[in-house]
C-alpha cells in the first residue's frame, strides 16, 4: 500500500489490480497503481486468458476473496494471505481467475452433488432395516431442511468444461485435503475447533460445500449399511448429525457477523445476502424465499432413484461406522408413532397455513420400488412462517 496506508477500499484495490495486469501485458493504458504488495510476480506465458474474467462485472467477487472479513477494506495482511495461499505452480492471475469464475462453477457442481445425495437418502428408505428407521428418520429431520436451504441458495452457473479444466487440479486437491482431515477425526466434528482443524484458516463459505458433500457422502454410506446391519443409536442420532450441526453453527456465527456489517454500512441486508458469495446464504437469511407454503406447493422436486448396483461395491461397515454393529439391546423402538395426523407426499412438500404445526408424517409414494411406505420426521418442517 502507498503513502503509509495499511488498508485500501476493496473496490479501488481491485480496479487498480486490473489496470496493473492490463499495463503489464500492454493491453490498456493504466492509472496510478496503489497495490505494490501484489505485483511481485512474473507473467506466465498463458496468463492472458485471465483478463477476460478480471472485469467490472466480477470486481465485487474478486474484492471479496481479498477482503476476507467483508469490512470493505483490504489490508496488507489480507493481501499477503491471499497471494501465499495460491496452489503451487499457479500464477497470481490464475489464482484470481479461480475466485472470479472457477469458484462459482465449483459451488454449482457441489450443489448438484449434495442435492443428489439428499435425494438418494430418501430413495433408499424402503430398504432400511426396521430396527434402524428411527435413527434414520431423526437424522433426516435434523439435517435435510438445513442442507437444502443452503444448497438451493446457490445462484446457478453453467459449467464451461474447458475453463473448469484450468481449475480442476485445485478443486480435486482441496477435496482430498478435506477428506483426509475428516478421516483423521473419524468424520466426527465435535467442536468448533475441530471444524477449524479440518478446514484450516479462512471463512466458512470457502469450505462449506465440499465439507457438507464429504460428510453427507459418508453418512449415505451409513444409510447403505443400514439396509443389512443394525447400527448403534449414537451413529446417526448423535455423532453424525452433530457433525452437521457444528458446520451450521459456524455458518450461523458467520452470517451474524455479516448481518452486523451490512447494518453498520447501511446496506440492504436482503440484497446483500442475495449477492454475497453467489447467494449461498440467501435462503438462510430469508427462508420464505424457499419454504413459503405457496412456493412449496408449486415445487416439483427432482427424484433420484437408488440402485445398489451403481454405488461403490462392498462397502465395509467398519470403515464407515464408529460404533459396534448388530447390538439389539438398545431399548429403542424401531418406529416412532407420528405426533400429527397429517400425511404429505414425497419428498417433504407440506401444504400448511401460518401458525400450523409442521411436524408431520412423510409418505414415500407407491411408485418407489413398488412399496407403500411411511416415514415420520420429528422436526423436519419445524420452521417459522
Image (tube, helix red, strand yellow):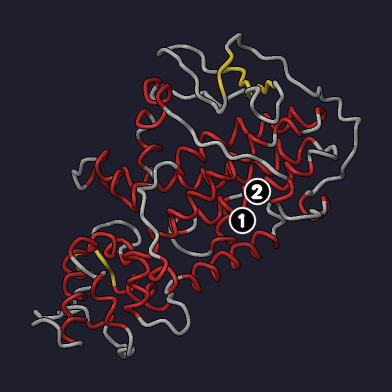
Q: Return the residue nearer the eye: 278 or 198.
A: 278
The image position of residue 148, as x and y in percent, is: 49, 38
Label 2 Cα crowd, 10 Å radius (few <14 / some 14-19 / many 20+): some
Describe the element under mark 2 as helix, strand or loop: loop
Q: Which mark is residue 90?
A: none
Residue 253, horizontal then vertical, whole percent: 44, 45
Q: Which residue is mark 2?
A: 190
At horizontal 20% and vertical 60% (from top left) the residue drawn is 57
- Identified at 83% across, 52% down, the residue is 318
Q: Return the residue nearer the eye: 80 or 309.
A: 309
Q: Residue at x 24, y 75 (%)?
A: 51
Q: Quadrant of residue 224?
A: top right
Left or right: where 203 falls relative to 184: left
CB contact under 8 Å: marks 2 and 1: yes
Q: Which mark is residue 194?
A: 1
Q: Nearer the viewer, residue 192 or 287?
A: 287
Amino acid at each position: 500500500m502507498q503513502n503509509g496506508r495499511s488498508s485500501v477500499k476493496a473496490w479501488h484495490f481491485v480496479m487498480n489490480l486490473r489496470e496493473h495486469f492490463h499495463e503489464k501485458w500492454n493491453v490498456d493504458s493504466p492509472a496510478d497503481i496503489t497495490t505494490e504488495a501484489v505485483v511481485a510476480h512474473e507473467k506466465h506465458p498463458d496468463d492472458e486468458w485471465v483478463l477476460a474474467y478480471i472485469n467490472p462485472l466480477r470486481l465485487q467477487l474478486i474484492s471479496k476473496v481479498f477482503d476476507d472479513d467483508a469490512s470493505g477494506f483490504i489490508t496488507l495482511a489480507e493481501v499477503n494471505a491471499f497471494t501465499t495461499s495460491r496452489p503451487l505452480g499457479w500464477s497470481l492471475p490464475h489464482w484470481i481467475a479461480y475466485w472470479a469464475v472457477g469458484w462459482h462453477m465449483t459451488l454449482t457442481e457441489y450443489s448438484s452433488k449434495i442435492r443428489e445425495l439428499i435425494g438418494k437418502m430418501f430413495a433408499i428408505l424402503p430398504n432400511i432395516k426396521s430396527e434402524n428407521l428411527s435413527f434414520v428418520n431423526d437424522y433426516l429431520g435434523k439435517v435435510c431442511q438445513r442442507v437444502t436451504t443452503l444448497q438451493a441458495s446457490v445462484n446457478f452457473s453453467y459449467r464451461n468444461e474447458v475453463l473448469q479444466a484450468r481449475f480442476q487440479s485445485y478443486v480435486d486437491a482441496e477435496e482430498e485435503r478435506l477428506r483426509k482431515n475428516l478421516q483423521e477425526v473419524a468424520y466426527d466434528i465435535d467442536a468448533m475447533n475441530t471444524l477449524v482443524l479440518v478446514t484450516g484458516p479462512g471463512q466458512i463459505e470457502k469450505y462449506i460445500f465440499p465439507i457438507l458433500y464429504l460428510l453427507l457422502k459418508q453418512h449415505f454410506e451409513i444409510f447403505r449399511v443400514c439396509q443389512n446391519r443394525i447400527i448403534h443409536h449414537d451413529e446417526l442420532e448423535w455423532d453424525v448429525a452433530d457433525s452437521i450441526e457444528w458446520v451450521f453453527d459456524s455458518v450461523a456465527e458467520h452470517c451474524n457477523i455479516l448481518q452486523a456489517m451490512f447494518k453498520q454500512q447501511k446496506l440492504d441486508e436482503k440484497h446483500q445476502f442475495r449477492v454475497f458469495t453467489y447467494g449461498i446464504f440467501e435462503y438462510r437469511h430469508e427462508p420464505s424465499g424457499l419454504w413459503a407454503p405457496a412456493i412449496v406447493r408449486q415445487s416439483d422436486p427432482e427424484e433420484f432413484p437408488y440402485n445398489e448396483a451403481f454405488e461403490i461395491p462392498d462397502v465395509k461397515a467398519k470403515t464407515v461406522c464408529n460404533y459396534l454393529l448388530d447390538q439389539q439391546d438398545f431399548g429403542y423402538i424401531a418406529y416412532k408413532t407420528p405426533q400429527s395426523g397429517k400425511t404429505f407426499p414425497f419428498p417433504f412438500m407440506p401444504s400448511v397455513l401460518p401458525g400450523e404445526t409442521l411436524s408431520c408424517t412423510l409418505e414415500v409414494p407407491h411408485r418407489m420400488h413398488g412399496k407403500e411406505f411411511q416415514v415420520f420426521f420429528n422436526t423436519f418442517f419445524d420452521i417459522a412462517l
